[in-house]
Image (cartoon, rainbow, N blue to C red):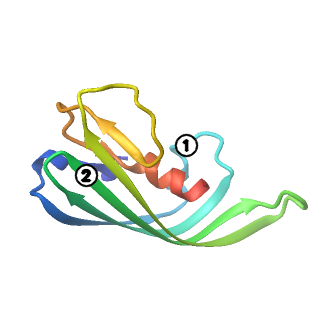
Amino acid sequence: MNEYIIPFKGLKDGEHDFDYVLDKSFLKNFDNSDVKDINMSVAVKLIKNNRLLEFIFHLKGNVVVECDRCLDALSLPINYKSTTIAKTENVEDIQEDDIIYLLPTDSKIDISQIIYENIIF
C-alpha cells in the first residue's frame, strides 16, 4: 500500500492535496474487517508546518456491511470529515486521540490505517 505513504520530509511547508479511490482491494490489508465492500473517494489535505502535520480527511462514498439482525448485505452512505495531527517529538509510546507522534528521524507517514479507522468508526 505504498500509495498511502506520504514522504513529508520532501514537501515544502504549506498545503498539499492527495486524492484516493478505495475499493474492496483496500480492505484486504486489514484483518477481521466488518466492512465487506467499499466504493469511496478520499480527499486528504495536508497542511505542513515546521514540526506539525495537519491532515484533513474527507471521505465520501458507500460501504457494505453485514446487517446485525438479518445478516443481509447493507450499503451505508458515508460523507465524513475528520482531522488528525502529527507532531514531531522526541518521545515514543504516547497515545492521544487524533494526534500521532513522529520521531524527528521519521521522513514519511502511512495514512492507510488512519483512513481505515475513519471508515469503521
> Which residue does the image show at 37% across and 41% down from the upper left?
100
Give whichever of 70, 96 is nearer the camera: 96
Mark seen at residue 10: none
SS for dot 2: strand
Q: Position of residue 63 (x, y in %)?
A: 62, 65
Disc 2/disc 1 C-alpha distance (Å) = 25 Å
**What type is the residue that disc 2 sits on?**
Leu
Please state if 45 lies on the left or on the right of 21 as rendered: left
Disc 2 or disc 1, which is closer to the eye? 2
Please name the residue that numbered disc 2 is placed on. Answer: 53
Q: Please tell me which of labels 2 and 1 falls first in the chain.
A: 1
Please name the residue that numbered disc 1 is placed on. Answer: 30
Give the quadrant of residue 104. Answer: top left
> How many C-alpha atoms fall within 10 Å of the one at disc 1: few (<14), some, or many (≥20)?
few
> Which residue does the image show at 67% across and 71% down from the upper left?
76
Image: 102 above or below 45 = above
Please state if 3 lies on the left or on the right of 119 as rendered: left
Give whichever of 80, 72 is nearer the camera: 80
Q: Position of residue 20 (x, y in %)?
A: 38, 65
Give the quadrant of residue 51. Answer: top left
**What type is the residue that disc 1 sits on?**
Phe
